[in-house]
Image (cartoon, rainbow, N blue to C red):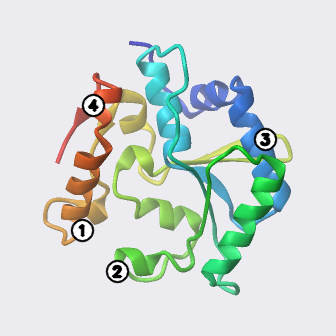
């Protein structure tokens, strides 16, 4: 199994992927406040790398998040998806404003996009990347250790004693990640 040990190695893996860099450059054009491309966009790339896959595992969507307390309308998110689709029409864009997503998790309002990421169900999914003036930035509120070791565990908000734990278990069951990446270790 190939290993990634540092955020710099993770950035290098992303920087070497022309498709990923094109996605990041496209998202940067929108200049959304506190925006990141996150979740499966990075997770799948790393797990494909760890499993030495020759081809990219298809993504259900490309998760773009941002934080804007002023425009909380879901319609505004759809407008951003349409803008991204004008640039790259064949990509499955999904844009979510983290200033309103706390309602989904039934939690207190998030303070930033990174706070929103911290509330994602799985630790290796709680990661984002963005391009700012040619510089790659990684946001990993729970670190990268789980992601780069192929370990799946719930974030603190989805732990076993949490009312959200059933959501975590359901996602693990529905995603069937072990059938795609058999070396993963999944913890409940």
Mark 4 or mark 2, which has the lower sequence index?
2
Cα distance between the residues tagged 3 and 4:
33 Å
Q: Secondary structure at mark 3?
A: strand
Q: Give how far across and how far down residue 138 sits, in percent.
A: 61, 45
Mark 3 or mark 1, which has the lower sequence index?
3
Cα distance between the residues tagged 1 and 2:
9 Å
| Rendered-image quadrant of the N terminus | top left
The image's mark for residue 114 is none
Mark 3 burial class by Cα count in 10 Å: few <14, some 14-19, many 20+: few
Q: Quadrant of residue 163?
A: bottom left
Which of these two is toward me, 46 or 84? 84
Q: Nearer the observer, disc 1 or disc 4?
A: 4
Q: Is residue 55 placed above or below 145 in the rendered structure? A: above
Question: Circle 3 is placed at which residue position?
Answer: 135
What residue is rendered at 45% in x and 39% in y?
144
Q: Is residue 12 placed above or below 68 in the rendered structure? A: above
Mark 4 burial class by Cα count in 10 Å: few <14, some 14-19, many 20+: few
Cα distance between the residues tagged 1 and 4:
22 Å
Mark 1 or mark 2, which has the lower sequence index?
2
Q: Nearer the observer, disc 3 or disc 1?
A: 1
Q: Secondary structure at mark 1?
A: loop
Mark 1 burial class by Cα count in 10 Å: few <14, some 14-19, many 20+: some
What residue is rendered at 49% in x and 29% in y?
57
Q: Give how far across and how far down residue 28 sits, in percent.
A: 80, 53
Q: Is residue 11 placed above or below 138 in the rendered structure? A: above
The image's mark for residue 164 is 1
Cα distance between the residues tagged 2 and 3:
34 Å
Mark 2 or mark 3, which has the lower sequence index?
2
Question: Circle 2 is placed at which residue position?
Answer: 106
Question: Circle 4 is placed at which residue position?
Answer: 178
């Amino acid at each position: 199994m190939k290993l990634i040990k540092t955020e710099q190695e993770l950035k290098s893996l992303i920087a070497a992927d022309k498709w990923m860099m094109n996605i990041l450059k496209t998202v940067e054009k929108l200049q959304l406040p506190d925006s990141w491309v996150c979740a499966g966009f990075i997770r799948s790339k790393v797990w494909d790398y760890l499993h030495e896959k020759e081809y990219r595992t298809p993504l259900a969507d490309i998760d773009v998040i941002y934080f804007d307390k002023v425009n909380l309308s879901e319609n505004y998110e759809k407008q951003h998806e349409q803008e991204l689709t004008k640039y790259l029409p064949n990509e499955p864009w999904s844009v979510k404003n983290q200033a309103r997503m706390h309602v989904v998790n039934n939690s207190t309002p998030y303070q930033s996009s990174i706070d929103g990421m911290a509330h994602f169900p799985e630790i290796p999914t709680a990661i984002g990347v963005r391009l700012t003036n040619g510089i790659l930035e990684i946001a990993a509120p729970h670190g990268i250790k789980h992601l780069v070791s192929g370990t799946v565990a719930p974030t603190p908000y989805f732990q076993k004693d949490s009312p959200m734990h059933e959501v975590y278990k359901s996602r693990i069951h529905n995603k069937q990640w072990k059938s795609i990446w058999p070396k993963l270790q999944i913890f409940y």
